[in-house]
Image: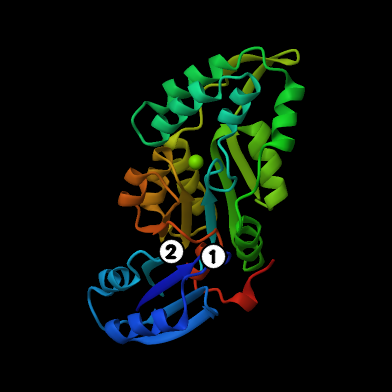
Amino acid sequence: MPVLCLIANPNDSELDPALAAAIAGQTGGELNWLNHAIACEIIEPKSTDALDIARQIIGQRRVDAAIVPTEQRRKQILIADMDSTMIEQECIDELAAALGIKEQVAEITDRAMRGELDFGQALDTRVALLKGLERKVVEQVRREQITLMPGGRALVQTMKAYGAYTSLVSGGFTLFAEYFAKRIGFDEAVANVLEFDGEQLTGTVTKPIVDKDTKRERLVALAAERNLQLSQTIAVGDGANDLDMIRIAGFGVAMHAKPAVAAEAGIRIDHGDLTALLYLQGYSDEEIVR
Ligand SMILES: [Mg+2]
């Protein structure tokens, strides 16, 4: 049974009851609010092109729309990208800023995340530029320059409360991924290891690197270990290296993603925060662990 989800950003909602009623009026189906004026679902829309109808009526308003099946709607595995998905920055760009070369590195990051460059080569090139950076500066960047994406803790804590396993898989670095995984509440973190010579970065990462294949393989392995089908999983990311795991997950979510990623993903969230992933799964406001 299909459900049409309408989701806004809790801090800036343009989803009012009139808009939801207007959409339900056109698509048919039963309107049910998950969080008043922030997220609702239209159960069993009658139109076959309900998503197109919803998007047309939404127009320029900052409201996301997605159609999901109700079968196995609450997922048992969450696998998430870190940079620009669970945190608001790209760690490597912030490390580069400490060396005064942010612009140069950020341009490569952006192109790699758009899928225009080979991920491994782009990683090597950028990490080489960080050679000599001191460990204490890395830790300072981690402490002072990184902010958590809104809704991330609620997403992880709620899914865990309902029995899911949560994994942070990052093409970034363990120094960040392990730290933020712990703060957010993830069960595990997988990321690249920056190599040190004493207290300074050598400009290299341990091989083999965590790339798009690692992310996809981790999702497949986690599902197998827990006797789950991929349809019982949800993956979220914003970059080209997330697309393979997004494609095979039950719910594959492109989160404020690069255009090529958003176009390919089953579900795109352009306006909502990370609690959008809970509303997609049918969690109501009262069920969300905050
Ligand atoms: Mg990312």
Residue bearing mark 1 = 12
In which image quadrant can residue 111 be found?
top left
**Are the residues flagged by discs 2 and 1 in contact, CB closer than 8 Å?**
yes
x then y, percent, for residue 51: 29, 70
x then y, percent, for residue 229: 43, 59
x then y, percent, for residue 276: 51, 64
Q: Is residue 110 above or below residue 132?
A: below
Q: Secondary structure at mark 2?
A: loop
Quadrant, the N terminus: bottom left
Front residue (pair 201, 227): 201
x then y, percent, for residue 248: 37, 51
Q: How many numbered marks have been drawn onto this rendered protein structure?
A: 2
47 sits to left or right of 196: left
Q: Residue furthest front?
A: 60
At 59% across and 14% down in the image, what residue appears? 203
At 55% across and 73% down in the image, what residue appears? 283
- Amino acid type assigned to the residue bearing label 1 in the image: Asp
Quadrant, the C terminus: bottom right
- Amino acid type assigned to the residue bearing label 2 in the image: Arg
Front residue (pair 186, 116): 116
Of the numbered discs in the image, which one, if any, rests on residue 62?
2
In which image quadrant can residue 71 be found?
bottom left
